[in-house]
Amino acid sequence: MDKKAVILLSGGLDSATVLFLAKKRGFSLKALIFDYGQRHKKEVKFAEKLAKITKTEYTIVKVKIPWSRSSLTGSVKSFPKRLSKSVPSTYVSGRNMIFLSYAVSYAESIGANAIFIGAHTQDYSDYPDCRKDFLESFNRAANLGIADKRIKFHYPLIDKNKKEIIQLGLEAGVPFELTWSCYSGKELPCGRCDSCRFRLNAFKELGLKDPLLKKL
């Protein structure tokens, strides 16, 4: 069985967990790290660290999305808390579709038949491009548009919440102190944005302190 795969690596705890899970499953990985003008560009550096400690070859892809209206790429000074049943201000229109398109092109070019992404249940309720039905549909569409029609998307966290993801990561040996989640991208995590709150609450539910905060 061909075990060559491409992984979307953001530097966050979700993609870090997927990286270690895919490694444990014996996949030979090539990572794509995206610099798309995000305010928390610090995550790119953390993604590089993760790639280096796992000896994963990586490519940093710079993507411009000048029409983005997301608070992740804009100049707002704070991130509004997520409202129930609403698309959050941090949503970047079509981001996963763009990233996965790059991954499909890269995978076909190097002969890989698998693509890993860290999409999961706590995101897909509000982020339309993290939903399982989108990933399944886009996978089918992608294979219709390429010569090698064997590429399969893998999203092993899709039914997991943050607490369950951290549990999986701990079992897989993920160094969570080398992951970054905060949207602000400052020296220390802000502890207030959605990403920080989900992360801190998950570690707290497990009776643990976030190792990133211990290190900082």
Image (cartoon, rainbow, N blue to C red):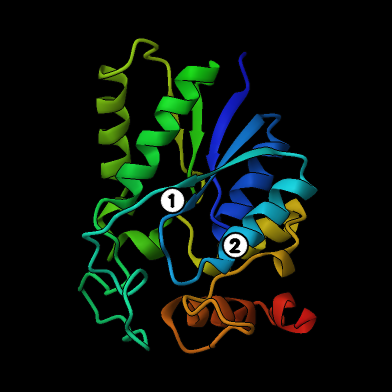
- 192 shown above or below 183: below
Where residue 10 sits, quadrant-wise, is bottom right
Which of discs 1 and 2 lies nearer the camera? The answer is 2
Residue 12 showing in the rendered view: no
Q: What residue type is disc 2 on?
A: Leu
Closer-to-camera residue (6/45): 45
Q: Residue at x 55, y 82 (%)?
A: 201
Q: Distance from label 1 to label 2 (Cα)?
A: 14 Å
Q: Secondary structure at mark 1?
A: loop
Q: Residue 89's spot in the image, x, y percent? A: 27, 74
Mark 2 = which residue?
Answer: 13
- 62 shown above or below 184: above
Q: Secondary structure at mark 2?
A: helix
Q: Residue at x 37, y 63 (%)?
A: 123
Q: Which image quadrant: the C terminus? A: bottom right
- 202 shown above or below 131: below
Q: Residue 11's spot in the image, x, y percent? A: 59, 59
Where residue 76 sits, quadrant-wise, is bottom left
Q: Residue 115's spot in the image, x, y percent? A: 49, 33
Q: How many marks?
A: 2
